[in-house]
Image (cartoon, rainbow, N blue to C red):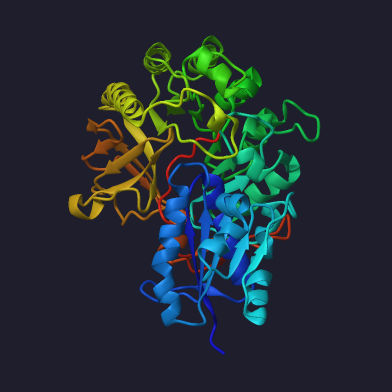
Amino acid sequence: MSTRTYQVRTFGCQMNVHDSERLAGLLEDAGYRPAVDGGVPDVVVLNTCAVRENADNKLYGNLGHLRPTKLANPGMQIAVGGCLAQKDRGEIVRRAPWVDVVFGTHNIGSLPVLLERARHNERAQVEILESLEVFPSTLPARRDSAHSGWVSISVGCNNTCTFCIVPSLRGRERDRRPGEVLAEVEALVAEGVLEVTLLGQNVNSYGVEFGDRLAFGKLLRACGGVDGLERVRFTSPHPKDFTGDVIAAMAETPNVCHQLHMPLQSGSDRVLRAMRRSYRQARYLSIIDEVRAAMPDAAITTDIIVGFPGETEEDFQETLDVVRAARFSSAFTFQYSKRPGTPAAELPDQLPKEVVQERFERLIAVQEEVSWAQNRALVGTTVEVLVSTGEGRKDADTRRMSGRARDGRLVHFTPEGAASPIRPGDLVHTKVTYGAPHHLVADGPVVAHRRTRAGDHHEAGLRPRTSGVGLGIPSFGPPAQTPEPVGGCSVQ
């Protein structure tokens, strides 16, 4: 019998991207192999998002496109997981009866068993748990990158924002012990990974489960002691839990990047109250000031929702005022979308689409003006770039390569002047020649180029694969199917 193949398609936030690495690892442990480009997979897994208004349309559109392929390939299976599966449950099979498996956010480890059961019973299997079965990081993972890795420190959320459905789908916050987190970080670094991103729905409430409110700052400092770890990032914090010890840890730990994603959502105190966000404009801006006082070079990004029910023009102007005052390097901007099951969906004064659209366009224009001014100010400076793949859509046409600076900015650079070929996973220093609203350009010769083990592994087609035995050491294998690009998810 030939080896069965799989493809995972990912929609939504970074949490889903990391969950898809776990799903790929589970399937490979069960004997599956990634489908080759152009081939028909034996199993297609859709890892869904429920945050945005068109999430349902996107899922059922994908399922509709898959139906004729499945009819032409009777042994093919389709599985649906993630937040939308947790929310819609049996509705998915009712609307798309050609789906074989539906599983939720709390039991991603069940996927291989459910696929086998669906084949054996010749009927769809729907299994949705109400609470976490096992912490996702105890499951195997097929990592997407040779140089950067996600490391979950917590799952779930204890906040009650009126616009957000995530807590009801991901559950209450569950924290990993610091030793387990550090063991995973060290294991990845031992295999050449240069950068980790600590991941949680609300990272700076980390420690609530084991009673240490300073745990996140301590974890950042502990990451500073991991030899060979060159960059530490985290996402996403919540302003209500952000404390001075975290700012100090960022400023005083050399490998923690001076990049901060701090969700704003609205600049209006009245709207923040309606959103059930437990901070106000003045508190938010004071955090930004504290961060900039400790790290003047910090790049701060945010999430903003436009058109929340009852938002007035005056409320919206306050949001624009905060955008100008905070000087965000970039922002994930969202038009409010009514999500069934959230308190905000039942609020009066839902705004007309044309009003929301017009404000959205004004917000983007102001943010681009702010971003562009900051990026122009970087012209002539030298930046360190961790080279990546897939971030420069026009790289083939421009003969550039792309990567991220330490502050998270996207940099497109000309790979000239290096003594040896530059690979994804390598580090280069290059001088900025142009600042655009969404990226930097460096068109001169590179100033310096350092080849890395991550670059060696990328060149050889190898990626870390964590074993899933809690503190297991990664092994290596061919890269997994590249997931679809995902946008920012407004969950904080």
- What is the quadrant of the N terminus in the image? bottom right
Q: Residue at x 53, y 9 (%)?
A: 282
Residues 73 and 141: in front is 73
Q: Which residue is drawn at 56% across and 36% down?
A: 234
- What is the quadrant of the C terminus in the image? top right
* Outermost residue, bottom side: 1
Residues 446 and 299: in front is 299
Q: Which residue is drawn at 81% across and 30% down?
A: 211
Q: In this view, does 193 lie above or below 479?
A: above
Q: Residue at x 60, y 69 (%)?
A: 27
Q: In this view, does 95 lie above or below 216?
A: below
* In-image side of 479 versus 473 (left or right): left
- What is the x, y in percent for residue 78? 52, 69
Instruction: Mark yes or no: residue 153 visible.
Output: no
- What is the x, y in percent for residue 473? 67, 59
* Outermost residue, right side: 211
Residues 113 and 306: in front is 306
Q: In this view, does 101 lie above or below 331?
A: below
